[in-house]
Amino acid sequence: MNIEHSIPMVAVDSSMIEAIGYDSNSYILVVDFTKGGSYSYLGVPKAVYDGLLSAESVGKAFHATVKHSGFSFTREA
């Protein structure tokens, strides 16, 4: 599904996550990890993306609101 290039990415201050992007039309959150790998999470509300951008710890917020929330995801090439 390689959609990551069509979604603008925002660099974040995190040891775990390099950048995040969001498409509000399709509710897709894209996460680029610092150790490699980019994942697209499907059906993510914009409030979750906004919360990641404003979180004191992006990694902790990601684990709490995305990783353990049951969103479907795909690994991008």
Image (spheres, helix red, strand yellow):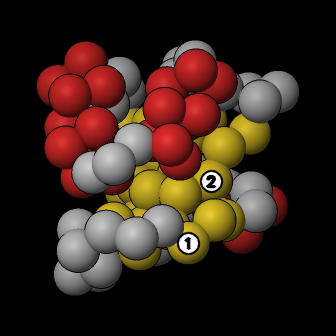
Q: CA distance from mark 1 to mark 2?
A: 9 Å
Q: Secondary structure at mark 2?
A: strand
Q: Amino acid at mark 2?
A: Gly
Q: Is residue 70 left or right of residue 48?
A: left
Residue occupying the point 22% across, 81% down:
35
Closest to the camera, between mark 1 and mark 2, is 1
Q: Secondary structure at mark 1?
A: strand
Q: Is residue 42 visible?
A: no
Q: Which residue is mark 2?
A: 21
Residue occupying the point 23% across, 74% down:
15
Q: Amino acid at mark 1?
A: Ala
Q: Decide which of 26, 24 is in the foreground and name it.
A: 24
Q: Are marks 1 and 2 in contact (CB under 8 Å)?
A: no
Residue occupying the point 59% across, 34% down:
50
Q: Which residue is mark 1?
A: 11
Report which quarter residue 31 is drawn in. Answer: bottom left
| Relative vertical location of residue 3 with respect to residue 36 in this rendering, above or below | above
Q: Decide which of 49, 44 is in the foreground and name it.
A: 49
User: In the rendering, at what x and y percent does residue 40 appear?
Assistant: 48, 47
